[in-house]
Structure formats: C-alpha cells, structure tokens
Image (spheres, coloured by chain):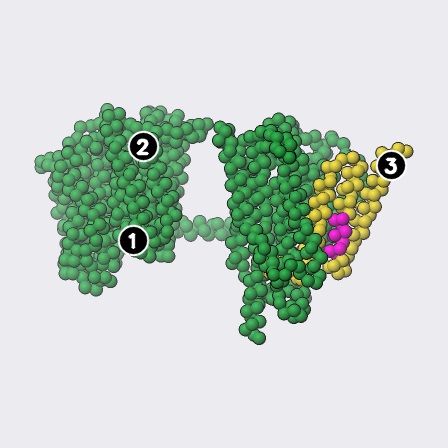
Amino acid sequence: MNMGSLVALAAWFASACFGLAMCLATWRLIRGPAAQDRVLGLDTLYVNAMAMLLAYGLRVGSGAWFEIALLIALFGFVGSVALAKFLLRGEVIEP
Amino acid sequence: MTLALIVLLPFLGSLCAAFLPANARNAEAWLAGVCALACTVLTLGLYPQIADDGVVRFVLPWLGQAGLAFSLRMDGFAWLFTLLVSLMGTLVVIYARYYLSPEDPVPRFFSFLLAFTGSMLGIVLSGNLVQLAIFWELTSFSSFMLIAYWYHRVDARHGARMALTVTAAGGFCLLAGVIMLGTMAGSFELDQVLAAAEAVQSHPWYPVMLVLVLLGALTKSAQFPFQFWLPHAMAAPTPVSAYLHSATMVKAGVFLLARLWPVLAGTDLWFAVVCGAGLASLLIGAAAALFQRDMKGVLAYSTVSHLGLITLLLGMNSRLALVAAVFHMMNHATFKATLFMAAGIVDHEAGTRDLRRLSGLAHAMPITATVAVVAAAAMAGVPLLNGFLSKEMFFAETIFAGDGLLLRVGLPAIATMAGAFSVAYSLRLIHQVFYGPLAQDLPRVPHEPTRWMLLPSMLLVAACLLVGIFPARTIGPVLALAVQSILGAETPPYSLVVWHGFTVPFLMSAIAFAGGIGLYLLRWFYGQRATGGAPLRAPFDGRRVFDIVIVVLHRVAERMVRFASSRRLQLQLLMMISMAFAVGAIPIATHGLARGAAGLTPVDPVYALVWIVGCVCAVGAAVQAKFHRLAALIMLGGAGLFTSLTFAWFSAPDLALTQVAVEVVTLVLLLLGLRWLPRRLDLDDPDRRTRRARLRRARDLALAVIVGAGLAALSFAVLTHAPVEGLAQFFVEHALPKGGGRNVVNVILVDFRGFDTLGEITVVSIVALTVYALLRRFRPAPESIDVPRAQRASIAESGIRAFNPGELLPGGDLRIPAVLVRLLLPMAGLVAVYLLLRGHDAPGGGFVGGLVMATAFITQYMVSGAQWVEWRMRVHPQYWVALGLTAAGGAGLLAWAAGRPFLASLGADVTLPLVGPVHLASVLLFDVGVYLVVIGATSLMLVSLAHQSFRSARESFARDGAGG
C-alpha cells in the first residue's frame, strides 16, 4: 500500500466520520430541547462541514475547496455570534 | 445645429430650473425668459435661410436598424409654429412671474413650463414621425404636471388626470397610426412620407391608419367627442391655460392635421371624419361658451369652438381652406392668449372669475379692459382685427365646400350660427365683466396690475390690430411661406385685404353680428338666473362618459383581482401552487417525461448521508416555521449550509461561496427582524381540531408533496439529458480569449452580461435606499417596543442600557467575543479584497467580497452595539452605494473613451512594483463597483433595521423618566 492510497483512504474515513458527526449535530438541532442546544448544533454543523470540504479536497487532490472552507469558518462564526447574541440579549444589535 | 439648439435649450433650462431654490422667483423667470427668448431669436435668425432654401435639416444617427434617426426639419410652416411657441413662451414667462404668488413653488412651475416648451418645439420641428409621437407624449405629460400644479385642489387633480388619460390615450393611437403610416410610405422621415400620398391613400389599411392618427389629433385638440377635458384643464394656473390650452399645445392636433394634409387629405373618409368632428366642436363649443359662469370656462369652450373651426377648414379638402386654417391658427393664438391673460389679471386683482359677481371693472382697470375689449372683438370677428380676416375666409370656404343642397346651404348656415354664438359670448364676456356699475362685494378691491403683467397682452393686442389693418404687409410673406411649404407648387392664389366688397361672406358676417347681438339681448333678460350648464348639454357631456368609463374600468379590474386572488395567504398560496403545477403538468401529460440517455454518477455514501441530513433540516424548518420561529431559522441555516456543500460537491465553487455568504447575512437580517415581531399568541383555536381543518391540512400536505416530487422529477429529467449546445459552450470557449478571465462565471457576470449586472446592482441600490426610507417611518407593534426581557436584569443591575461608547471593551459575557471580532475585521477585509481581486480567474468576485466585508462591519455592531461603533467609525453606506454605482458605470463609460461600445472590456498587462505582473482590466473596476454596492446596500439595510432599537430605547427611557 503506497502513501497516496493511504491518504485517500484516511481522507475517506475522515469524511465518513465528519458525516456521522453531522448526523448527530443535526439530531441536536432538530430535538433541542433548548434553543442553546440548537445553536450549538448549528455551530458544530458548520465546523464539520468545513472539515469535510477539506477532507474532500484531500481526496480529489485539489485546493479549490480551501476558500469555501475558509468562508464557512468565517460565516459559521458570524452566524453563531448572531444567534448567541440574540439568545443572550434578546436583540442582535443593541443601541 | 441651430435647430438642435432650439429644441435642446428649453430642456436644459428646465433641468437648471428644477434645481434653483424654491423662492427664487426672479432667477427662475429670468432663466425661463432667456431660454424662450433665445429660441425666438434663433428662430428669427433662420428666416432668411428658410425663405431662400425652403427647408433646414439636422440629422443625428440614432436607431439605424429601426430606420430611425433623430431628425429635425424646419420649413415655412414649422418656422411659423416655432416662432409662435417660443415667442408666446417668452410672453407667458413674463406674465407668470407676476401672476404666481410668493407661496407657489416656482421651480416646479418653470421647470415644467420649459420642458413643455421644449417638447412642443420638438413636435413642431420633428422630421421623423416616431420622434414626433415621443415629443407628443412629452407635451401630454408636462401638461398633466402643469394642470396639477396646485395639487392640493381636487379639481386640479381631477382635471389633470382627465387631460392625461384622454391625450395620452390619443397619443398611443397616434403612435400606432404613424407606425402604420411610416410602413405604408416606406419611411418614417417626413420628407418621404409627404411624397408618398398615392401609395398611402391606395393602401387597404388606409382607413384604419387614418382613424388612429385622427384619434391622436382630435384628442389633443379637444375636438368632439373628446372636447370635455379642456374645460376641466382650466384648473391650471392661468399662464398655463394661456400658453398650453389655447395658444400652443391644443394646436398640436390641428398642426399635425395640417402637417400631414398633403398625404392624408383628399379622401371622402377624411372629409367625413374631420369635417364632422370640426363642425360638431364648432357648434357645441360656441353654444356651451354662452352658458358658462367662469371667465376661463367661456374661454375654454370658445377655444374648443375655434379649434373646431380650424379642423373644419382642414377637413374640407380645399387648398384655400388650408390657407384659412393656418391663418386662423395664428390669429386664434394671439387673441385667445390675450383674453386668458386678461382673465388671469381679473382673477388676480379682483379675486374671482365668476361672471355673475364681476361687473364694471373698466372703471377700476381701464388698460386691462381696453386690451380685453380689442381681443374679444378679434374673437368675435370685428373688422380691422385679425379674427375678421380669417373668419371671412372661413365663411367664403363654407359656401364652396360641398356638393348637394344640404351642404351648400347647411354648412354656411351653421357657420353663420356659430359666428353669431361667437359674437354673443364675446359680448357677454366683455359686457358683464367690464361694463355696468362697479361691483362692490368682490374679494379684493380691483385695480390695475403692474405694467409688466400687462405688457405681454398689450403686445399681443398690438399684433391683432397690425395684422387686422395691414395683413399683406405683416403676416402676408410669412403666411405665404408657411402655406407654400405645405402645398408646394399647388399653392392657390388668395388675397389678404381688409375689404373685399359686398360679398356673400360679408353678408354672413353681418347676419352673424346682428344675430349675436340679438342672442345676447335675449339672454340678458333670462340669463340672470342661469345655472352655468348649457341646455341640451347632457347628451354631449363627455365628462360623464369619461367618469363612467373610468369607474367601469376600476370595477372590472377589482372584480378580476378578486377572482384571481384572495386576501388569505393560505388560499393564495394554494391557488398559486396549483396553477404552477397545472402549467407544468399539461405539457408533461401530453408529451410525457422521458429520462435522458446520460448515465448516473455513482452514489458517494458520505455525500448521500449529508444530503439526507440536509433534507431533514429543510423539513424541520417547514414544520417549525409557525410554532417556533427561532428553531425554524436555525434549521434553515442548516439547510442552507447543506445547499452550499452540494454546490461545492458538484464543482460550482462560485455558487457555494455566494450561498454561504448569503445564508448568514439572511440569518442576521431575519434575527434583526425577529426582535420586532410580537410574540406568538398561543390561542386555543377550536378550529384546529375539527375534521374540516384536518382535511384541509391533509390536502395542503398532499399538494406540497406532489408539487415537490414533480419538480424533482422535472430536474432529474433535465439533468439526464445531454446539455444543449449553445450559449454555455460559447461562454466557456470565449471567456479567456475575449473576456480575459479564467473564471467563466465571473466573466459572464462582469463582461458578457455586464449590462444585466449593472441593472441588478442598480436595483439592489434602489431596494436598499427604499428599505432605509421605509424604516424611517417604521412603527413597531406596541408590545415589542419594550427592552427585550433578556436585558432587563442587567439593566436593573447597572442602571444603563447602552454600552458606554467611551469604554474600550464591553464587560461581562461579551468581552471575549468583542476581542475576537475586532481582530476579525482586518482579516475579513483581507479575505474580501482577495476574493474581489482574484474573482476574474478563480472563484470569488465582487459580490462575495462585498458580502464578506459587510458581514465584518455588521459583526462589529453585534458585539459592541451601534453607538460604540458609530462613535468611532461612520460607515456611511449611502456613500459606498453611490461610489459603487459610479465606479461600475464609469467602467462602462471608459470603453466609450476608447471608441468601443458601452461596457466593453479593456485590459492591459502591466508590471507593478512589489506586486509583479498584473492584468489590469476595466472589468476589475466594474467588479469593484459591484463590491462597493454590495457592501453599501447590505450594511444600509441591516444598520437601518438595527437603528430601530435607538428609537425604541429613547421612547422607553422617556417613559421610564416620566414614570419615575
């Protein structure tokens, strides 16, 4: 077994794990019970989606997915901040 | 070139006038007056050229493919009208300066007056029929704005709407008519059309075309059966009535009839329609004028009558009648404008125009009275005044107009009768207003107006007298030139002398005078209790018909709306979706939905898992949407993320980037809005558990599933077919060689389809500004004004609501996020610029870059509060939007500078210090424009929504302060 196929296999395994993690996060997202659980679920989804894209990039050997992962990281953070702020203070932008 | 200047100057003046301050009465009047005077002088300067060459032309290439050029053409007839419009414009401006009161907003008045002057000159000088129709509509529009000048008055609004409806509908018919005419003649150029009389008149569609053109002309000139709008247009300020509704605009209809006379006239249909409309207007107008109470009403109906006279002359298919028509157009303009100005002076100085209240004003204002008497005498056709000459010509023509006893006797008889009416209402107007004892109970004490207000009417009266006494030496050569330009070599001999001897026309005049005086004396005895309406008027009451038509139209529209829609959202959605389903299902039912030949891609288990999870999120969002808004919003975020992953998976990185960005910006927007939504009231709705409600929900669910499955089947069928060769291939092949970029999506957006993108960012800017404007007036529901529950505890503890802008970092939970987010700003800026710059060759572009930057700004607002951010950094989103539109538009204009079409891409490879070789293209500037617009529009919308808390904060502080 050479290195290339080992990396491909590892990347595939990693994607499968991320997919499983996304399933679990979605479970939290759907079930709740508290709104905070759902927000955490969404944040976890974003993190796993980013990781999955990077693993996919490894599998096909291309860097084209890197920017998308970068933006998912950036916007996932912003979305979580907005939701957290809403839960914490009742409005996203205070006066 | 001079021609272009004559048309352009008033429009330029109109633009300048619109931007002067509201009280700059003198500056406005000077500007308008100088513009009109300059046009007059330029026109006068062209006289030698017209007299020598006959025609002056100016042609600018425009839409060559459609056979259209911007073409101006001035011959003798057009010269005469140009002089009339510009000279009358000058006089009316002088008059209006003193007529308008200081409270009236002058910029609007003069701006539209100048715009009208320009459009009217455009009609007169157009050498192209389609272009003429465009200017025609412009005059209708400016007339609308001027009639509605005092829009706080009901009659002004109503009159303006009526005038616009009638004349614009006529203009539409005219456009259809001239397109048919141009097709028949083989060209839209007036020269060719005028030379194609035989081809046009022998065409099978000639009657349809003629009726359409006549509809345009007759509505504009307020001819029967469209005469009703003109009296209602008298709600306009008197200068407007004098200028538009007696001297120029209403003349456009008869101008067009005379202009197209060589090509359209000569047939029986022309004779029947034009003569019929003219005759009816002549008689109805004259009769109705007798019974008016309002001075301007008398003048309006008299205008209808005199325009009817001109129309009648034009319809007679006789060259001599055409001469008389052109002559009377000029004469009517001079004396009727004078009378309107006099009526305006009376209104201005005495405070009323009611004929029953006015009396004996000659004692108080002798000069005005003299002027009005002379003008009214010209209107009645008293010898030694210009009205007499054209009326004699008219009488002479009626004798020879037709064959058969009915026409030989009837036409002169009706003409004489109309003449008698004309004498009677002129007499009434003068006698009631200016003679008898001076009225005592007038709203104001009447006195002579300033000299400058009198000057225009005095000049016009002088013209009436001069033309009336020395016709051959004053109007003679000009009239000859005008008539020759219409009739060419076939101009008939005519004589312009005051005294023709005791002829039949003179006898008719004498009868008309005797009859008119008799009529007036009769009326004198019973007219004291006249109520203002003419007897026998009901069958001709166009206004009633107009109102009925409008009401019926409204009802029909309402019924259609009610038939096709519902006020209940659920029902409306049901109808829309069922309809969409039916539209999609019919072709599938007839042709079947075949799966294409393309093979399926192998299923990737990981991707399949991701996709199922995404579907669960989407369904969850739909289920929770009504009961738990925040949860639905979060699940929507999940579904959006999976959509973005799908795009990435199928190698559409641009779409994936945009989807992620849009998803989060939407989330923030909805969260901002959510704060203002009142809490859901959990009523125990008994309706929810009935069988009917369950059935309804089952039906909706079934429909949703069927339509969704249908859409999925449709996209599956489309995707399994081989892609059609066409645009996609073209874009892929030409993106690099022609667009200079490797990212096809971006090249399409900024280059191939750049014009679309320019339109889209303009729309985005408009939407953002509209949201901003609407939110300034936003009033939240009373229960949402309070500070959110989550903050009350901390406010009660610290006693302050907003985060103090003077502090560096917020305390408590937000301290760490604040640090992170501030560090994020430069990083996000870097990413944004990176995405923007590389967009042409790799995934990215101005749109995504702009969203990243805007999100970074909004995040600052989120962690630190609006006051803290704005204390340190004003984002000024409006400036970004303006700058962006300028950059995008400028990038397009840059191509013009290089002699290429608008938005063509220009590029150059340069080597910059530190950066290295760079491909600089104008499309990059365009993309920068997109970037700036997106930043500006996004932050404008979000920030103005966020600013609502400011106001509610102030309100609740004020209330707490008052309470405690």
**Residue B4 x %, y %:** 34, 33
Whether callout 1 and callout 2 share a subunit is answered yes
- Residue A83: name its quadrant: bottom right
Q: Quadrant of the C terminus of chain B?
A: bottom right
Camera-near label (3 vs 1) is 3
Q: Is residue B781 visible?
A: yes
Mark 1 highlights which residue? B100
Residue at 67% x, 35% y is: B842
Whether callout 3 and callout 1 share a subunit is answered no
Q: Quadrant of the N terminus of chain B?
A: top left
Mark 3 highlights which residue? A6
**Residue B659 x %, y %:** 67, 44
Q: CA distance from mark 3 to mark 1?
A: 90 Å
Q: CA distance from mark 2 to mark 3?
A: 83 Å
What secondary structure is found at the residue carrying circle 3? Answer: helix
Chain in green on the image: B
Q: Which residues are magenta?
A: A38-47
Report the front residue among B370 and B307: B370
Q: Are marks 2 and 3 in contact (CB under 8 Å)?
A: no
In the displayed structure, B684 sits above or below B762; it is below
Q: Chain of mark 3?
A: A
What secondary structure is found at the residue carrying circle 2? Answer: helix
Residue at the extreme bottom: B964
